[in-house]
Amino acid sequence: MTTEGTDPTPSVGLAAGRGVWVVVPTYDERENLPALVEAVMAVLPEARLLVVDDHSPDGTGDLADSLAAANPRVEVLHRPAKQGLGAAYRDGFKRVLDQPGTMAVVQMDADFS
């Protein structure tokens, strides 16, 4: 088997998170969100993170906006009402799959599971 003529760059890029979106639905996750953003950015330094907030009453959405303002790789999708985890993932996946350069999507709960 030969690897002549192959370009290893895509796998290296994916390992660093290039072209990767991490979709994280949130509802009342204000306490977890800063550590989550920091951890994702540390593990995948080139990844993008989409926080899908389900109209959290604890201020998660506002905190997510602040984190996004401080880091251009973080985006927030605000939903007008609590519509559930499945719908949050669906809306998040739709948003990131419409972005140019998306090569992979990772789903993750805000409690690190």
Image: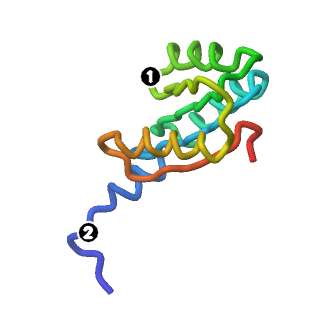
Who's the residue at 65% across and 29% down the image? 54
- Quarter location, residue 40: top right
Nearest the eye: 88 or 24: 88
- Quarter location, residue 51: top right
Q: Nearer the viewer, mark 2 or mark 1?
A: 1
Residue density around tag 1, few if under 14, some if 14–19, many if 20 or more, within 10 Å: few
Name the residue furthest bottom: 1
* Image quadrant where one finds the N terminus: bottom left
Q: What separation in Å lies between label 2 and label 1 (alpha carbons)?
A: 32 Å
Judged from the image, the secondary structure of the residue bearing numbered disc 2 is loop
Label 2 or label 1, whichever comes before in sequence order: 2
Q: Is residue 41 left or right of residue 108?
A: left
Q: Position of residue 20 (x, y in %)?
A: 45, 46
Q: Position of residue 61 (x, y in %)?
A: 63, 19
Q: Is residue 8 left or right of residue 106?
A: left
Amino acid type, label 2: Thr
Q: Position of residue 104 (x, y in %)?
A: 44, 53
Q: Which residue is mark 2?
A: 6
Who's the residue at 27% across and 62% down the image? 7
Nearest the eye: 14 or 68: 68
Q: Which residue is mark 1?
A: 72
